[in-house]
Image (cartoon, helix red, strand yellow):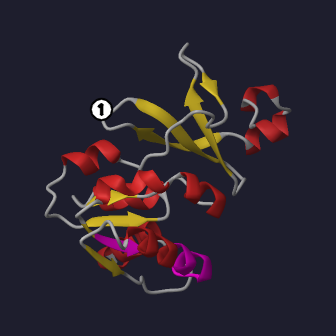
């Protein structure tokens, strides 16, 4: 369980400062939980609403859903769905008008519990874009295997450059286009 940053010492509180949060919502749009990214820590955390305006820093009892689920369900079923590893990558693709998602369950043990989260992709065409490294391709293969009986078509997309993620690639491409 992650403590509130305000309960830590000054140095630790700076490292624990939340620099990004990503909402996971159910099909009706209700907030289920958030993933958190902290300053100076590569570690990510989770929190869920406590029902009283505060947060509980665990996922106990939270249904695992795809990121941007309401947008995915509202999208034209004929459109390709892009599956990426990180919420920031899904958001970057969404700013381009694309349907994009990711699965919050990154660890193998969590993936087994999250299998039902892929159901909204039934009959959809999906493009899986991993971060371009060994772990990314293991994730992509695992994701493709899970979707084989669900999706109507699956493509694996490779980005140029080692360790490149979608958001990084888009930022670099935009910068090169401007200069």
Q: Circle 1 — which element?
A: loop
Name the residue carrying label 1. 28
Nearest the viewer among 113 and 68 is: 113
Give the extent of the magenta segment: 126-139
Q: Residue at x 73, y 32 (%)?
A: 5
Q: Residue at x 35, y 54 (%)?
A: 119
Residue 137 among magenta residues: yes
Using the image, determine if residue 146 lies above or below residue 37: below
Nearest the viewer among 56 and 27 is: 27
Q: Relative to 172, is 134 on the left or the right?
A: right
Determine which quarter of the picture holds residue 100.
bottom left
Using the image, determine if residue 50 lies above or below residue 9: above
Q: Position of residue 44 (x, y in %)?
A: 65, 50
Q: Position of residue 84 (x, y in %)?
A: 43, 66
Q: Residue at x 86, y 32 (%)?
A: 9
Q: Relative to 24, is 92 on the left or the right?
A: left
Using the image, determine if residue 97 lies above or below residue 60: below
Determine which quarter of the picture holds residue 163.
bottom right
Q: Position of residue 131 (x, y in %)?
A: 51, 75
Residue with the most extreme front position: 149
Q: Residue at x 43, y 52 (%)?
A: 116
């Amino acid at each position: 369980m992650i403590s509130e940053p305000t309960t830590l010492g000054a140095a630790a509180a700076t490292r624990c400062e939340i620099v990004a949060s990503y909402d996971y919502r159910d099909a009706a749009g209700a907030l289920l939980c958030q993933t958190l990214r902290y300053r100076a820590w590569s570690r990510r955390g989770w929190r869920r609403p406590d029902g009283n305006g505060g947060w509980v820093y665990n996922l106990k009892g939270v249904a695992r859903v795809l990121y941007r689920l309401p947008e995915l369900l509202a999208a034209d079923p004929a459109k390709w769905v892009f599956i990426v590893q990180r919420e920031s990558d899904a958001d970057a693709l969404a700013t381009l008008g694309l349907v994009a998602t990711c699965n919050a369950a990154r660890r193998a043990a969590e993936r087994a519990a999250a299998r039902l989260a892929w159901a909204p992709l039934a009959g959809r065409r999906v493009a899986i874009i991993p971060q371009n490294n060994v772990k990314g391709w293991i994730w992509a293969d695992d994701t493709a295997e899970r979707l084989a009986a669900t999706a109507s078509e699956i493509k694996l997309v490779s980005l140029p450059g080692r360790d490149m993620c979608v958001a990084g690639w888009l930022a670099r491409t935009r910068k090169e286009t401007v200069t």
